[in-house]
């Protein structure tokens, strides 16, 4: 893509002029383990329902802005009133809308890096100051420092499981943040379906009106291409998010696809369980490479964070010589020499371990 010419940059709003187009660092390869997608795809028993939903969708009509039937079904699934649910064009749109609604000059965000880079990006787009409370040894969040910072913040975002480190944020920490923060505490649970049952903080929603929980259909429900996410929050917070959203951001087709996934959600459980089991197997195999300098962190998500010697070089050789794409985080502060490997199908996981082993052995 052509860069932004200096004369065009000079015309841009100052907070936007510092940006460049997002690069997902994607290259065409045989084995894609870079974006935490669900490599099993749509379960065969759901595919006909999805196809029918798309065929029967009212293509000539604008979508129902807040998602009508999809919203009701998500609400019933999570046992909350529909007024406590808002859908978006992927979790990404909802994250952006949080900053549009609650961020801006003088409305600080507290975040807990290393974490999902999009929070900082969206904050800067709407001139939101960011207070970063860095994780400590082995990526443990410093909850006391977060709580102190939250006292003056309008928005706190914590990610559970965290991307790319894979750990859950402690439930008691979420409670303390909700009690300390005069603004909104957003818990990004994009990967929660891969975590041990009972790990979600959704159960705290009735207690804290300033708690919001983000989910997506992109990961466990294999719909990254459809772009649908949702937030559970108090009705007034949902109304604030509704006020800033683009009315038709989730298309008729995407709503139909997500509705098919919700109504057939049990069909996704076998792949989720397979990914969880393969995560254990892949972690153990990678941990067995300690003599080659490999370090693995425990994960509750569908990816594993791993430190390897000369990670950038290993990442490039995996891509160029083995046609395997993982995500390189080696230039992110706190993640030096770290790669993030999505847990794929067993044969894909075997391929990445085999390739990494021979690269690290210098073969
Ligand atoms: N939150 C986290 C932590 C993520 O990693 C992602 C996707 N990479 C998202 C939210 C947004 O996902 P989507 O827009 O596909 O719903």
Image (cartoon, grey):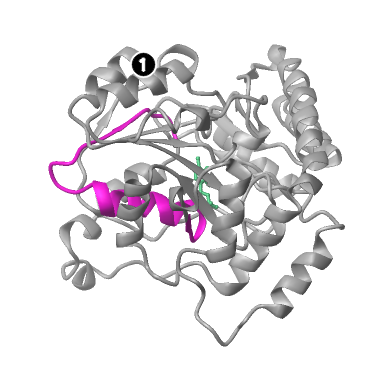
Farthest front residue? Answer: 81
Which portion, as a residue range, is magenta?
Answer: 87-115
Given residues 220 and 302, the one toward you in this image is 220
Please check the rendered image and state whether residue 105 is part of the magenta-colored stretch, yes or no: yes
Label 1: few (<14), some (14–19) or many (≥20) C-alpha neighbours in 10 Å: some
User: In front: 173, or 108?
Assistant: 173
Q: Is residue 267 left or right of residue 193?
A: right
Quadrant assignment, res 57: bottom right
Which quarter of the rendered picture does the N terminus lie within? bottom left
Q: Name the residue rendered at 71%, 61% in the picture.
A: 260
Identify the residue shown where x is 50% and y is 72%: 64
Residue lying at 81% horizontally and 59% vertically, measured from the top left = 46
* Side of 105 relative to 32 (left or right): left
Find residue 357 and report its horizontal and vertical position in percent: 76, 27
Q: Is residue 264 visible?
A: yes
Residue 163 horizontal/vertical position (percent): 52, 34
Q: Which residue is mark 1?
A: 143
């Amino acid at each position: 893509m052509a860069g932004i010419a200096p004369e065009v940059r000079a015309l841009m709003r100052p907070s936007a002029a510092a940006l460049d187009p997002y690069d997902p660092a994607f290259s065409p390869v045989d084995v894609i383990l870079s974006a935490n997608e669900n490599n099993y795809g749509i379960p065969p028993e759901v595919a006909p329902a999805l196809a029918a939903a798309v065929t029967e969708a009212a293509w000539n009509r604008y979508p129902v802005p807040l998602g009508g039937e999809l919203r009701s079904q998500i609400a019933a699934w999570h046992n909350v009133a529909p007024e406590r649910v808002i859908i978006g064009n992927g979790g990404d749109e909802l994250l952006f809308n949080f900053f549009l609604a609650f961020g801006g000059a003088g409305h600080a965000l507290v975040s807990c890096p290393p974490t999902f880079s999009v929070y900082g990006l969206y904050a800067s787009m709407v001139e939101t100051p960011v207070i970063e409370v860095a994780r400590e040894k082995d990526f443990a969040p410093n909850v006391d420092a977060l709580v102190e910072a939250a006292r003056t913040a309008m928005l706190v975002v914590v990610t559970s499981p965290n991307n790319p480190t894979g750990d859950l944020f402690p439930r008691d920490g979420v409670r303390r943040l909700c009690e300390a923060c005069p603004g909104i505490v957003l818990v990004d649970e994009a990967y929660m379906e891969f975590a041990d049952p009972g790990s979600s903080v959704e159960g705290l929603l009735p207690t804290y009106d300033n708690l919001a929980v983000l989910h997506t259909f992109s990961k466990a429900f294999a719909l990254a291409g459809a772009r649908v996410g949702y937030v559970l929050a108090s009705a007034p917070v949902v109304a604030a998010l509704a006020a800033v959203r683009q009315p038709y951001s989730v298309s008729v087709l995407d709503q139909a696809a997500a509705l098919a996934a919700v109504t057939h959600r049990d069909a996704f459980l076998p792949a989720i369980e397979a990914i969880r089991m393969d995560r254990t197997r892949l972690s153990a195999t990678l941990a067995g490479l300690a003599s080659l300098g490999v370090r693995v962190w425990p994960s509750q998500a569908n990816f594993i964070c791993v430190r390897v010697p000369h990670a950038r070089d290993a990442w490039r050789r995996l891509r160029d010589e083995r046609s395997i794409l993982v995500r390189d985080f080696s230039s992110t502060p706190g993640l030096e020499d770290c790669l993030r490997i999505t847990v794929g199908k067993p044969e894909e996981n075997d391929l990445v371990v085999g390739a990494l082993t021979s690269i690290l052995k210098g073969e």
